[in-house]
Image (tube, grey):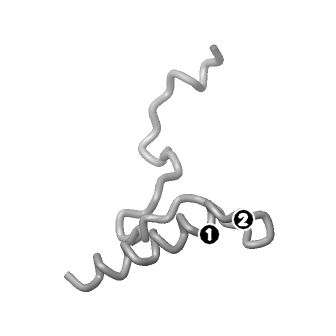
C-alpha cells in the first residue's frame, strides 16, 4: 500500500448517484434490432405495468 491510501481528506469523495435524481426503474439497455419475440413481450408487459402504476 502506498502512503496516500491511509490519508483521509475532507475533500475526497466517491462518485455516486445524485440524491435528487429520480430513478425510472429501468436499468437495462434495449436494442430493437436484436430483440426477439420474448424481449418484445417482456417490454409490452413492462409498459403495461408502468401504466398501471402511474394510474394509482
**50 relative to 41, above or below:** below
Q: Nearer the viewer, residue 11 or 55?
A: 55
Instruction: Say which label, 2 or 1, has the lower sequence index.
Output: 2
- Could you say where residue 46 lies in the image, as x and y percent from the top left? 45, 69
49 on left or right of 6: left
**5 relative to 31, above or below:** above
Proximity of marks 2 and 1: CB atoms separated by less than 8 Å: yes
Q: Label 2 belongs to which residue? A: 35
Q: Nearer the viewer, residue 51 or 14?
A: 51
Q: Secondary structure at mark 1?
A: helix
- Could you say where residue 55 lies in the image, as x and y percent from the top left? 25, 85
Circle count: 2
Q: Label 1 belongs to which residue? A: 40
Residue at 47% in and 48% down: 11
Q: Secondary structure at mark 2?
A: loop
Residue 49, by quadrant, is bottom left
Q: Quadrant of the C terminus?
A: bottom left
Outermost residue, bottom side: 55
Residue at 29% in and 82% down: 54
| Crowd tier of the residue under label 1, counting other residues whose Cα lies within 10 Å: few below 14, some 14–19, many 20 or above | few
Residue at 46% in and 58% down: 17
Q: Quadrant of the N terminus?
A: top right
Outermost residue, front side: 37
- Could you say where residue 35 lies in the image, as x and y percent from the top left? 72, 65
Amino acid at each position: 500500500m502506498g502512503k496516500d491510501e491511509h490519508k483521509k481528506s475532507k475533500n475526497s469523495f466517491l462518485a455516486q448517484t445524485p440524491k435528487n435524481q429520480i430513478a425510472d426503474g429501468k436499468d437495462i439497455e434495449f436494442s430493437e434490432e436484436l430483440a426477439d419475440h420474448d424481449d418484445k413481450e417482456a417490454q409490452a408487459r413492462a409498459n403495461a405495468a408502468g401504466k398501471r402504476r402511474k394510474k394509482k
